[in-house]
């Protein structure tokens, strides 16, 4: 898959409730706002970038990529970000990455794209091995066909909010990121400031 056919969407539209209500994407990681760190990590993997945020829009715009608030009201969750991204995307593919998982793989998009094309799927979703040894889907790390927009509009307007309930309607391939050399903390998301500081430790 040609990376120039993929738009990267950084999801920074949450309430940050488990972080005390702070805007998670603007918290520092190694001296840099999380969302900017994510943009810089994702940028080399895609052709275009954009951010989904619902607060402090001017701060996000200062990072140099287009910023779009949710098209659904009341902090409707990650699928609202997916919907916003699909509506604004001008490439055939959209990849989603949350702003609170700063160590995500630098070959994320290439591996999702290869698996999607090999399986002729509509969606490729990352899966990672968690502390209990189980391989679990990471639905906020997904590569999507942009022509799934109509399906997602219908699902969300019907009240649907769960990513896996929507992706189950389409051919979805799970892509494991547990090979030798894959970083164990690649998909660890920081829900608290303490967890964020913990991720900064080598």
Image (spheres, rainbow, N blue to C red):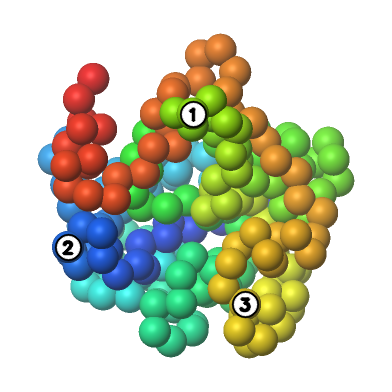
Residue drawn at x 69%, y 66% is: 166
Which residue lies under the disc numbered 2?
20
Up-down relation of residue 98 to residue 186 (above or below): below
Few, some or many residues within 10 Å of mark 2 (<14, 14–19, 20+): few
Q: Is 33 left, or right, of 8 in this rendering?
A: left
- Mark seen at residue 32: none
Q: How many labels does the image show?
A: 3
- Locate the C terminus and report the quarter of the image it occupies: top left
Q: Nearer the viewer, residue 184 or 151?
A: 184
Residue drawn at x 39%, y 37% is: 188
Query: Disc 1 versus disc 2: distance between alpha carbons?
Result: 27 Å
- Mark seen at residue 132: 1
Residue drawn at x 30%, y 45% is: 190
Q: Earlier in the sequence, mark 1 or mark 2?
A: 2
Which residue lies under the disc numbered 3?
160
- Locate the N terminus and report the quarter of the image it occupies: top right
Residue 95 pos. (x, y %): 58, 52
Few, some or many residues within 10 Å of mark 3 (<14, 14–19, 20+): some
Locate residue 30: give its quadrant: top left
Locate residue 145: give its quadrant: bottom right
Query: Disc 3 versus disc 1: distance between alpha carbons?
Result: 29 Å
| Disc 3, SS | loop
């Amino acid at each position: 898959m040609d990376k120039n056919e993929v738009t990267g969407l950084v999801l920074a539209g949450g309430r940050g409730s488990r972080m005390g209500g702070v805007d998670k994407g603007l918290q520092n990681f190694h001296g840099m706002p999380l969302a900017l760190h994510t943009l810089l990590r994702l940028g080399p993997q895609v052709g275009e970038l954009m951010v989904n945020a619902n607060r402090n829009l001017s701060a996000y715009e200062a990072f140099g990529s287009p910023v779009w608030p949710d098209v659904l009201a009341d902090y409707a969750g990650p699928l609202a970000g997916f919907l916003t991204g699909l509506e604004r995307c001008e490439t055939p593919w959209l990849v989603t990455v949350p702003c609170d998982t700063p160590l995500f793989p630098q070959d994320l998009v290439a591996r999702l794209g290869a698996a999607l094309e090999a399986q002729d799927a509509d969606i490729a979703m990352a899966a990672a091995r968690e502390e209990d040894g189980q391989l679990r889907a990471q639905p906020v790390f997904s590569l999507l066909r942009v022509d799934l927009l109509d399906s997602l509009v219908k699902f969300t307007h019907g009240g649907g909010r769960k990513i896996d309930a929507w992706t189950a309607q389409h051919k979805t391939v799970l892509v494991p990121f547990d090979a030798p050399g894959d970083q164990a903390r690649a998909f660890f998301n920081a829900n608290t400031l303490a967890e964020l500081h913990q991720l900064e430790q080598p």
